[in-house]
Amino acid sequence: MLKKFFERLTNWELWPFALIYFPISFVWVWYMIRSRAFWFFTPSNPTIAFGGFEGEGKKEMYDQLPPHTVPRTIYIMHDLSFEEVKKKLELAGFTYPFIVKPDVGMKGILFRKIDSEDQLKKYHERIPVEYIVQDLVELPVEVSVFYFRHPSAQKGTVSGFINKELLHVIGNGADTLQQLIANHPRAKHRMLEMQHRHAHRFERVIEKDHIFYLSYAGNHNRGAHFTNLRNEIDENLHHVFDELSHYSKHFYYGRYDIKTTSIEDLKQGKNFVILEYNGCGAEPNHIYDCNMSLGEAYREILKHWKALFEISKHNNRHGFPYWNFQRGYRFLKQSQQHFKLLQKYD
């Protein structure tokens, strides 16, 4: 227990989000003052609610991307009868397995891989909000690309490029799942979450060399491991994301989560699927798992905040006003209530 505590104390990446960001929060406040707007970021992506900071629906995002770049997706109201859900799946041509997640979701909460009708029925009966059914994209490489572009410029900047490895353990034919988790460098710090998700499997001995995924959400807060691919950033990669930015007209700042056959194919603009586009609330997650000091991470975050401020200021001057305090407050309050509801049922 003491060893775990010392690891968390000395590794800033394991600190709570609020603790990491508190020392630089005055910069965010300074941008509010300069903009004379509490929600100065809202025009950054003007066609997404709240600029994509929080609480936006996935439909908003998917509708603004090239259709061939996003997974097949249908939307399910939580109060439909299960027979109606099955009919919708059949009409859309879905077969098991597939992915389900809330239309308005965050941090991988209620993200599930569904392998059977029984699993879907339990999920549908439990989830309290509209959700999406989506193809399980099984391309071998999962990456995140952070991109921003000033609205007056034709070309933008790929500021971050990482490979994602989902949180998993590998069986040795002797240890139980609980033992494998307890010995995993990241999963051991998430034992409460692991108990919630996998307690019914804890006594199972995982076969030798079998990969057991503890989470299918490729988020840092869900334990995914990142590998920095900054050396792969080149003109070809910039060209792909410049084209996406111009296609959607007003995607100026955010992070794309993508699956692809290979890094080279992505650079050629082929064989990739966009799982998510995260707007101005997206964290530059390339600060993690790349041996950055806390000071270096702060410099990277502040670089992105400056770009966010400049993009938002320009858009505010060109027909996309800042949200007023009342509007933003109401939206954020609703979003936080929604988030608490999702957490309750996760």
Image (tube, rainbow, N blue to C red):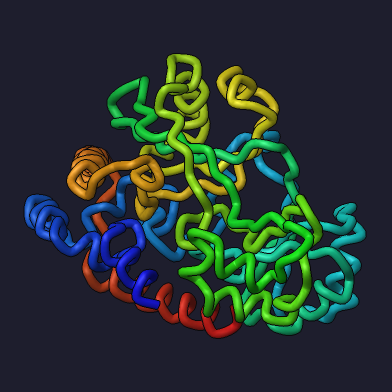
Front in this rendered view, residue 112 or 320? 112
- Vertical relation: 235 (above or below) 193: above
Q: Position of residue 233 (x, y in %)?
A: 43, 22
Residue at 15%, 60% in the rendered image: 25
- Vertical relation: 302 (above or below) 99: above
Q: Position of residue 106 (x, y in %)?
A: 49, 64
Disc tally is: 0
Q: Is residue 82 left or right of residue 54?
A: right
Q: Position of residue 255 (x, y in %)?
A: 44, 43
Q: Is residue 292 left or right of residue 310?
A: right
Q: Is residue 124 visible?
A: no
* Quarter location, residue 74: bottom right
Q: Position of residue 65 (x, y in %)?
A: 58, 39
Quadrant containing the C terminus in the rendered view: bottom right
Q: Looking at this view, name the residue that lies furthest to the front.
A: 174
Front in this rendered view, residue 115 or 105? 115
Q: Is residue 182 left or right of residue 327?
A: right
Residue at 79%, 57% in the rendered image: 98
Residue at 65%, 76% in the rendered image: 197
- Vertical relation: 310 (above or below) 324: above
